[in-house]
């Protein structure tokens, strides 16, 4: 059976590449998901990707991943700074995760400096733009012991 990994993007990340390019760049979420799919496929992994503007829907999707997905890469969007419920869900499913932010949250408003997830993440990447997702999946593949599949 294939090894599944999950990419989650939280509220407003459907606007990636479409608004505020000076902060988030020009790459769209569709581009990010397609690149992640190709990248994970090259490692013999199967990607599942999910974006929602609804906290409950994200929590439900995380519950579904329990015992099915081996690793999660998550950009929780604004929920990063507000959601105890998202923290509880990630802890409850016991799937390791990497927290990714396109922008450098520490160089922005003080309310973005705190994350409810970071202390439970395997790692946190911020400020590298959408390359953060690529770096995260390279790390995931290495962690899962996958080597690139040559075609
Ligand atoms: O830097 C990141 O990736 C963030 O997770 C993005 C969140 C923000 O609340 C976090 O503090 C940092 C915002 C979601 C993106 O919202 C957009 C709004 C307009 C255009 C593009 C994205």
Image (cartoon, rainbow, N blue to C red):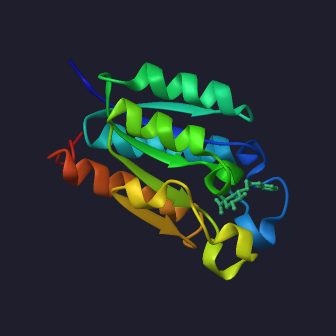
Q: Is residue 42 above or below residue 127?
A: above
Most foreground residue, 13 or 60: 60
| Residue at x 48%, y 38% (from the top left corner) | 88
Quarter of image, ligand 1:
bottom right
Quadrant occupied by the C terminus? top left
Q: Outermost residue toward the right?
A: 19
Q: How many marks?
A: 0
Quadrant occupied by the N terminus? top left
| Residue at x 44%, y 64% (from the top left corner) | 124
Q: Is residue 39 visible from the viewing direction of this image?
A: yes
Q: Position of residue 84 (x, y in %)?
A: 58, 45
Judge from the rendering whether residue 28 lies leftward or rightward of residue 50; answer left or right: right
Q: Position of residue 144 (x, y in %)?
A: 19, 44
Judge from the rendering whether residue 118 lies leftward or rightward of residue 110; answer left or right: left
| Residue at x 39%, y 54% (from the top left corner) | 120
Q: Position of residue 36 (x, y in %)?
A: 46, 45
The image quarter containing residue 149 is top left
Q: Is residue 60 above or below residue 30?
A: above
The image quarter containing residue 130 is bottom right
Q: Position of residue 91 (x, y in %)?
A: 40, 39
Q: Is residue 25 above or below residue 71?
A: below
Q: Is residue 104 visible from the viewing direction of this image?
A: no
């Amino acid at each position: 059976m294939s090894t599944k990994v999950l990419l989650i993007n939280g509220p407003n990340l459907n606007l990636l590449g479409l608004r505020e390019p000076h902060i988030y760049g020009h790459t769209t979420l569709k581009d990010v998901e397609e690149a992640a799919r190709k990248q994970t496929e090259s490692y013999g992994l199967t990607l599942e990707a999910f974006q929602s503007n609804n906290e409950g829907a994200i929590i439900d999707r995380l519950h579904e991943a329990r015992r099915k997905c081996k690793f999660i890469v998550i950009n929780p969007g604004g929920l990063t700074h507000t959601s105890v419920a998202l923290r509880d869900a990630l802890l409850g499913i016991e799937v390791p995760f990497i927290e990714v932010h396109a922008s450098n949250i520490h160089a922005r408003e003080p309310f973005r400096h705190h994350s409810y997830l970071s202390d439970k993440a395997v790692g946190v990447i911020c400020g590298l733009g959408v390359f953060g997702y690529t770096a995260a999946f390279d790390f995931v593949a290495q962690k899962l012991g996958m080597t690139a599949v040559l075609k």
